[in-house]
Amino acid sequence: FYLGVGIQSTAELEAPEVQSLCRQAAGIWTRDAASAARLRGVPGIGPVHAGADLAHLFFAATPPPPAATGRVTLVANFDYSSWPGRDACLRAVDELQPTSRIWLAQESRELPGAEKALHAALPENERSQWQLVAPEREGAPLGDVLRRWPSGEWLITSRFHAAIAGAWAGSKVIVIGINEKLRGIARELNVPLIAPDADRFTVTQALREARPATRPTALATLARQAGEAFVRSAVAPAR
C-alpha cells in the first residue's frame, strides 16, 4: 500500500522499475487527482484513489501566520537550473509598489537553482530590495519553523508546499509551473498559473487576478479520508 504518491512528470511512469512497483501495490492513494489519473494508465495496476497532500492536515492543525498586507513573498526554485522569467517577474512586482519584499528560502541548503543561489545571483541593486529569509533552524520542530514563515499578501512560488502554505495563510497565490505537481496544485487551489518564462504582461495579469485564498479545508478532509482508508486497508490483511 502507498499513501501520498505524486507524479512530478509523465516520464517517471515510463521507467520499468516504477511500473513494477506500481503493479505490486494492493492500493495507492495519491496526493492529487492528476497523479491518480496518470497512475491509472499504468498497465496492470491495482486500485488507485485520488487523495490530497498530507501537508493539509498539518496546516489545518498549525496554520501559518496570516498574510501580511503589502508584502510580496517569493519562493523561487528551479531545480538546478536558472529562472528564465526572473527579470520580467521582478518588474511586474515593482508595479505593485509593495511595502516589503521577502525572498523566502524554503530550502535551507545552498543548492544550484534553489532560493539562496538565485538570491545571490541577483544584481546588487535588486538584491538589496529583497530580504532573504530562511525560517528553518537545525533541529527545530516544524511548528517553530512555521511560526517564522513570512506570509505575504502576494505569494509567487515554484515550490509545491509553499503554495499550500500560502493558501492556508490567505495569500494571493501565483504558482510558477515548473513541473506537473506545481501545475496540479495550481488547479486544486484554483490560483493563477504562470510559465517559468512568463513575460512581464503575463505576470502582471496574474498578480491582478489573484485573490486572497480561502483555507482549503476540503483538501484537508480529503487527505484525512485517504489516510484513514490507507490504514484500514493496510491493517485488515493482518487480522
Image: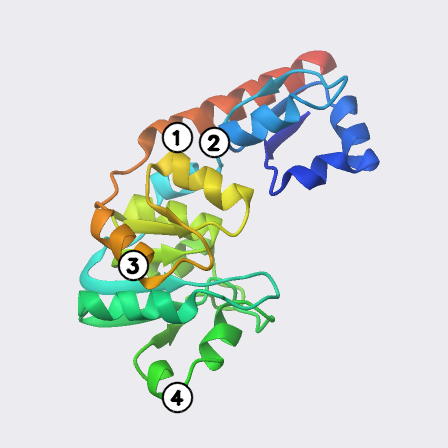
* Relative side of 109 to 120, left or right: right
> Could you give the CA–CA distance between mark 4 and mark 1, rounded to whole angstroms?
41 Å
Q: Do callouts 3 and 2 mark residues in contact (Cβ within 8 Å)?
A: no
Tag 4 residue:
124
Dot 1, how many residues are within 10 Å of its Cα: few (below 14), some (14-19), or many (20+)?
Answer: many
Q: Which of marks 4 and 3 is nearer the N terminus?
A: 4
* Relative side of 209 to 199, left or right: left
Residue at 50% x, 66% y is 83
Relative to 154, does residue 43 appear above or below in the rendering? above
Image quadrant in which the C terminus is located:
top right
Amino acid type shown at disc 1: Leu
> Callout 4: helix, strand or loop?
helix
Where residue 178 appears, x then y in whole percent?
A: 52, 52
> Callout 1: helix, strand or loop?
helix
Residue at 49% x, 80% y is 121
Q: Do callouts 4 and 2 mark residues in contact (Cβ within 8 Å)?
A: no
Tag 1 residue:
219
Q: Nearer the viewer, mark 4 or mark 3?
A: 3
> Could you give the CA–CA distance between mark 4 and mark 3, rounded to whole angstroms?
25 Å
Q: Which of marks 3 and 2 is in front?
A: 3
* Relative side of 232 to 155, left or right: right
